[in-house]
Image (cartoon, grey):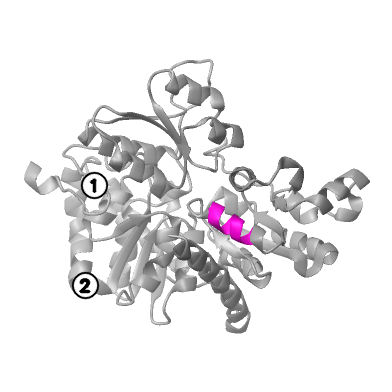
Amino acid sequence: MSTRTVVQLFRNSGLRIEPGMPICQVDLPFDWYQEEFKPYAEEYLALPDRTPESVLPWMDRYLLAAQKEFGPRLLLLAHYYMGGEIVKLVERYGGRIADSYELALQARSNAGAEFIVESAVHFMADAIATLAHPHQQVYITNPRAGCTLEMYAKEHQVAPAVEELQARYGEQLMVIAYMNTSGRVKALAGATGGAVCTSGNAKKVMQWALAQGKKILFVPDRNLAEVVCWWSGVAPERQFQWGGGEEGGQQRIARMSAEQRARLDAAQVIRWGSSCGVHTIFKPAMVEYWRARGYRVLVHPESPLPTVQAADGAGSTRYLWAAVEAAKAGEKLAIATEGHFVKNARALARQKGVEVVHLADIPDPAFQAMGCGCATMSRNDPPHLVAMVDLLRKGKAPDANKVIAGDVVDETTGARERLSPTERAGIVTHARRALDRMIEITERNN
């Protein structure tokens, strides 16, 4: 394959597939592929290497045929955090990469796309399906691609806490659900008059909620909740830390001390107790290390509050990507977020004469940290994408990969719980209401 064939500049991200570059950071074990996908995985694992020269001709055989058959009726999507260069591969075949807010809008914004194939995590596919038109079908390349934030804020954990708080505060309680939650948790937000938020619009949504004079339960990220409270002027004494995961579901106000109950009653914002393992490693000392070396430090707001306060800027993946796109030759950026994102940002920056480092990648043993990727995102790889699209073209798309709003999937086994049409209708109505409210708040303030 010639260099001319391999190198391609993509219209969305500016990322390139370069000759000889490694396509995948690691091969998944064979048992990570469902039965229908194993023949494709066998072909992929038998390729001589993971360079574009080997991988792209193999993918072209399947994906170009699907593009020819489906045309604009097929839409491929991926999130910025995707490892294994999936973001570059999706763009090669006419797809789009985006943050969670933009992904959620893709079905609604592309009515001509009948088949939407997402290489990311389940809560994102669920949001796409919730906002999709009735004729659209949403598929995920790997059903076991989940999110640790969502895993520790399941409906069976959050719903008892909502009931506990409603028993004390009634209609005064409003739930704000971060995008990193299932559709069923988003429905709790919708049912209480609340909204969904992303890291990009969390401040706008929080300020809207505070203006309603409600007591807010922010689910699930305690770090983002604390950061957004700081952005919005909610003092620490007006915040209350609830438990996360099973602890949160079992927490009871009657078992609290009188002092705890008084603090809860005084709180404007109740923070659910989950956090993202990728972002909790970032510390203010890391910020100071890179700033002392001439770097501008930008962090994702799922990082701990002291780190956000120490940084030069904080925002969503879209914000961080835009900062790299806007950087001038000679600038140096230290970015605190998911490792695969920073790797791709570094590649884009290099084309512009800009230096990018991962905040945690400090060559000093005193820090004992390194930038890590989102392991659950990395459960999507070229064989999953190829298999899903080719089986869809053949009319044999596995039902396990089809995402219907309100589904709950076990991230370990892939087992799915699907609601009856009647049960689903109520969940979807409330979840869509919360998503629509987020969109209204976001777009109104743009």
Q: What residue appears at the point 32 percent right and 71 percent down from the top-left corner?
A: 392
Is residue 151 a member of the stretch shown in magenta?
Answer: no
**Disc with the residue nearer the chain's start (2 vs 1):** 1
> Which quarter of the rendering shows the N terminus?
top left
Q: Pointer 2: residues within 10 angstroms few (<14), some, or many (20+)?
A: some
> As drawn, is 68 to the left or to the right of 206?
left
- The residue that disc 1 covers is 14
What residue sits right under mark 2 in the picture?
Answer: 71
At 89% from the left and 44% from the top, the residue drawn is 259
- Find the magenta span and give its range: 202-209
Question: Are dots 2 and 1 in contact, CB under 8 Å?
Answer: no
Figure check: 74 above or below 334: below
Q: Position of residue 446 (x, y in %)?
A: 43, 60
Point out residue 293 in the picture as x, y percentages from the top left corner.
39, 18
The image quarter in which residue 422 lies: bottom right
Determine whether, in the image, residue 323 is placed left or right of residue 265.
left
